[in-house]
Image (cartoon, coloured by chain):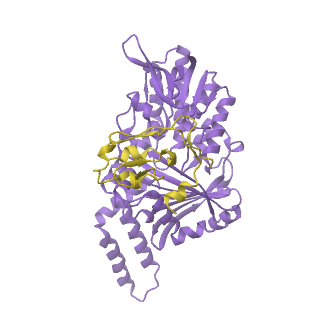
Chain colours: A yellow, B purple
Amino acid sequence: MDSREYLSLAAISPAQASHIRLDGENRCATCDDRTCLHVCPAGVFAWDESGERPLVCWQRCLECGACELVCPRGIIKFSYPRGGHGVINKC
Amino acid sequence: MEHFEALVVGAGPAGAAAAYHMAKNAVNVVLLERGDYPGSKNMFGGVIYSLPTAEICPEFWHEAPLERAVTKDMIWLLDIDSAVETAFHGLRYAGAPYNKFTALRPNFDRWLAGKAENAGARLINAALVKDLLYEKTRAGRKRVRGVILDDGTRIGADVVVLAEGALAALTRKAGLAPARSARQFSLWIREVVSLPPGKIEERFMLEEGEGAVLAMIGFPSGQASGLAGIFTNKDSLSLTIGMKLDRLSTLDAGLPELLTRLKSHPLVSRLLSGGKSVAYAAHLIPEGGYDTMPRLHSDGVMVVGDAAVLLYGRRGSDLAMLSGKMAAEAVVQARARRDYSAVLLKTYTHKIVKSFFYQNIKGVTKAKRYDARYGDAGYLLNTAANALAYEIFHAGMETDKERIKKLSGILAGKQPLTKTLPDLIAGLRNWRVL
């Protein structure tokens, strides 16, 4: 199973706006580590087809908050989604 | 602006226990939960411990939504095609007062918050606290006077209890904790696999109602030491895997890949066989220990549970409830004096410092530092144990003398024996196997 299949098991009711902010995303292009790509257990972070811009699929987020902590350049800013939105664990 | 005597941020075990104890003592308290219901954001690879939980609610097992009473604890040192197993099967734990229970947090947390509500607390769901409200005291210091929600609603309170969980954003905003780093956290994911109760009981050698906890050390994470676990619920297994964030950052694979690798292990896959995946979640655990604990109180505010880094070994949800109750007791005392300043609330910090868990959190500090320094210790122990076991149980054709020579060769080949012993001691302390 990959993260996409795992994620299909989670119930998420995403908010309209992203709760994950990139502060200075132009600096992502020169980041060699790109730790966010494999640490995020929901595959929230990706690159657009041209490989120039980072994409944040906040609708997939499981709200662990690891992304901000592992971002080597302090670009990712995580906060919880609006009240009553996001992950709904049923068991 | 609506005003309460006390306001609790977060309806997990810490917050709900705090609100419950305050409500029972006639404190006008509001409990705020950012999810649709308490527990909707929560998961654990863990169990509900009987003795501490009974401090919050005596004989809770008659009413709480629990899965199975744990009678069997197993540890596997897992290698590619083998496992060294240690297990304890204690049937005394199958009856009152029990020892610990497997549970599903959305059910348990909702039940405990419901207790608080029934005792008179007001529960507000879908309420995300964005910031704290302050006022200046006569002494010129800042004092917490309430909270502001993400929709702009302000709620006033004489005292605020922060039970906001691992990320502790408000605790830091209040200046009670410094900035955090990846080293202070581990990331866990959990998959729930549904299985008929009969199959679970057969595979783990249990009777109806009995449960097992299987902790696995080593295999799935390769070089770095990681932990995994299987918890038996009534008709499902919770499968968890976690690792320190700084170590995870240096790997090529993520936790989902490691979980998939674990599930395909020949000894693990036979436990899960025929099951259906039904849920997936992720959560951080603040593992920084004593060195990273925040200040626990200030004027008009206290910090409890994960936000206060009250964890050691496998324990956390129980310490969360106990700390919530201690904070509530401080509120009840302060209320009698109508003074919620730091001078009165410090009775909470005093209670924590005198608690058994504070001593234990402090006690594992050395082992934590050791673990941070020698990240490969778990891996080395694990592979050595399995290689030794293969040799010990092997029916060979050599003299005993030759065999002993071979065994010590395996052990010495891994690393100097003088490091193996401290590795073992630190590992056992850290994993709380001892």
Residue B199, image x, y percentages: 68, 66
**Outermost residue, bottom direction?**
B397
Q: Residue at x 64, y 39 (%)?
A: B110
Residues B27 and B346: in front is B27
Compared across the picture, whether B201 is left or right of A60 comes to right
Residues B229 and B157: in front is B157
Residue B374, image x, y percentages: 31, 57
Residue B143, image x, y percentages: 43, 18
Compared across the picture, whether B31 is left or right of B358 comes to right
Image quarter of residue B219: bottom left
Q: Quadrant of the N terminus of chain B?
A: top right
Q: Residue at x 47, y 74 (%)?
A: B81
Q: Is residue B426 above or below residue B220?
A: above
Residue B429 can be seen, yes or no:
no
Residues A21 and B82: in front is A21
Q: Residue at x 52, y 14 (%)?
A: B337
